[in-house]
Image: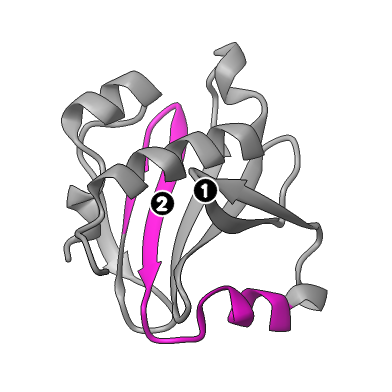
Amino acid sequence: MDPCQLLTPNQLRELGAAQSGKPDQAPWGETLCTWSDAIRVTVAPDTKRRGLTEVYLRKSSYNNFEASTVAGYPAVRADFGEIRCNVNVGVAEDQLLLVQYANNVSRKVEHKDTCAFGERIAAEVLKNLPAGG
């Protein structure tokens, strides 16, 4: 699964994100994708570790940590503030979708609530995940 295909051009336009993503390597060895312009969006699937369990085990390493839900899936907001938010969505027992959102220079009101917007991005990505992970 190419994470740069997990947001369609229409979704990127609606979100106000750059149209072309740049693939890179995640620390756990899978490919991630980053779109960066007025806002920065990174989508990083994690099928190699223990899903949300991994996030909870690392809870003390995050500046902020808050349980949440995205489109009916359990989620965790982590390391969030005025500029950025990491949204970890448990898509299966052992699979995670990490969406990192940062507001680089956008003045759009919808981009100001970093975690709410990060969760909106994650909900859009979930629509494009292949069935069965």
Image quadrant where residue 27 sits: bottom left
Q: Position of residue 51 (x, y in %)?
A: 51, 77
Instruction: Give the mark count.
Output: 2
SS under mark 2 = strand
Q: Position of residue 117 (x, y in %)?
A: 55, 32
The residue located at (72%, 48%) in the rendering is 80
SS under mark 1 = loop
Q: Nearer the viewer, mark 1 or mark 2?
A: 1
Image quadrant where residue 13 sits: top left
Q: Is residue 5 left or right of residue 106?
A: left
Q: Quadrant of the N terminus?
A: bottom left
The residue located at (58%, 73%) in the rendering is 52
Q: Position of residue 114 (x, y in %)?
A: 64, 35
129 to 60, vertically: above or below? above
The residue located at (38%, 63%) in the rendering is 44
The residue located at (67%, 28%) in the rendering is 113
Amino acid on which disc 2 is placed: Thr
Q: Is residue 88 left or right of residue 32?
A: right
Q: Which residue is mark 1?
A: 72
Q: Is residue 37 left or right of residue 105?
A: left
Q: Residues within 10 Å of mark 1 (few under 14, many from 20)?
A: few
Image quadrant where residue 45 sits: bottom left
Report the Cα–Cα distance between label 1 and label 2. 21 Å
Range drawn in magenta: 33-58
> Magenta stretch containing residue 69, yes or no?
no
Q: In terms of sequence position, does the residue under pointer 1 or pointer 2 come before the other? A: 2
Q: Residues within 10 Å of mark 2 (few under 14, many from 20)?
A: many
Amino acid on which disc 1 is placed: Gly
> Magenta stretch containing residue 39, yes or no?
yes
Q: Is residue 107 among the parts visible in the rendering?
A: no
Front residue of this view, candidates 32 and 125:
125
**Mark drawn on residue 42:** 2
